[in-house]
């Protein structure tokens, strides 16, 4: 297993947090997680089987899309950005029969409202949103987190603060 051991800054007002991340997927179900260059990657994107508008506050509402199979291995997909969004292509990295992928547009991004809003929109807000999504859609379950670009930085922040709920992560 490849390891990263170091520190991760959390916020300007808090000290760095020691982090030990293991970049090996040990759970057999998670070994099916395929990377960007896998021959299993499919260009045939399917629409989500469900979408939600998750109200976070009087200001922010997240757009949430569900792909794959309900009750399968839980995955939270964190897009790049800031300013990015999710689309039907985000689930292409996963075998839809084996995973339930929840993808969301971060605060101020994509179909989340209000668009381009910066109030109450920090990396730590995003980490809190990830945890809120995990509790809402996968209560009591450990999840796979998959982040692209800036999303992978948010996944590392989540790992530093909520490691017990991580099954595996990639990006």
Image (tube, rainbow, N blue to C red):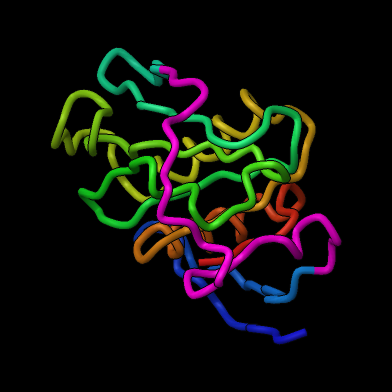
In the picture, which quadrant includes the N terminus?
Answer: bottom right
Q: Residue at x 40, y 40 (%)?
A: 125
Rendering coords of residue 114 (x, y %): 18, 24
Instruction: Place residue 18 in its image quadrant.
Output: bottom right
Instruction: Place residue 106 in its image quadrant.
Output: top left
Asked if residue 21 lies left or right of residue 92, the reply is right
Residue most toward the left? 116
- Magenta-tinted stretch: 26-52
Asked if residue 148 lies left or right of residue 74, the reply is left
In this picture, is 98 found above or below 64?
A: below
Rendering coords of residue 22 (x, y %): 72, 75
Magenta stretch mostly in which secondary structure? loop
Asked if residue 126 lies left or right of residue 136, the reply is left
In this picture, is 59 found above or below 75?
A: above
Q: Nearer the viewer, residue 110 or 28?
A: 28
Q: Nearer the viewer, residue 28 or 163?
A: 28
Is residue 32 found inside the magenta-colored segment of the image? yes
Instruction: Place residue 34 in its image quadrant.
Output: bottom right
Q: Nearer the viewer, residue 14 or 133?
A: 133
Q: Residue at x 84, y 61 (%)?
A: 27
Rendering coords of residue 64 (x, y %): 43, 28
Rendering coords of residue 95 (x, y %): 64, 51
């Amino acid at each position: 297993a490849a390891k990263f051991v170091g520190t991760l800054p959390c916020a300007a007002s808090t000290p760095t947090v020691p982090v030990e991340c293991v970049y090996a997927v040990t759970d057999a179900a998670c070994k099916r997680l395929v990377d960007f260059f896998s021959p299993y990657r499919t260009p045939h994107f399917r629409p989500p089987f469900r979408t939600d508008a998750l109200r976070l506050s009087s200001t922010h509402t997240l757009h949430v899309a569900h792909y794959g199979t309900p009750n399968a291995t839980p995955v939270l997909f964190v897009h790049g950005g800031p300013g990015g969004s999710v689309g039907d292509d985000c689930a292409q990295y996963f075998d839809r029969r084996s995973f339930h992928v929840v993808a969301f547009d971060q605060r101020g991004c994509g179909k989340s409202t209000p668009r381009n809003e910066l109030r109450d929109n920090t990396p730590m807000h995003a980490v809190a949103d990830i945890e809120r999504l995990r509790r809402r859609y996968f209560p009591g379950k450990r999840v796979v987190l998959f982040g692209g670009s800036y999303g992978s930085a948010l996944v590392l922040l989540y790992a530093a603060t909520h490691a017990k709920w991580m099954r595996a992560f990639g990006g």
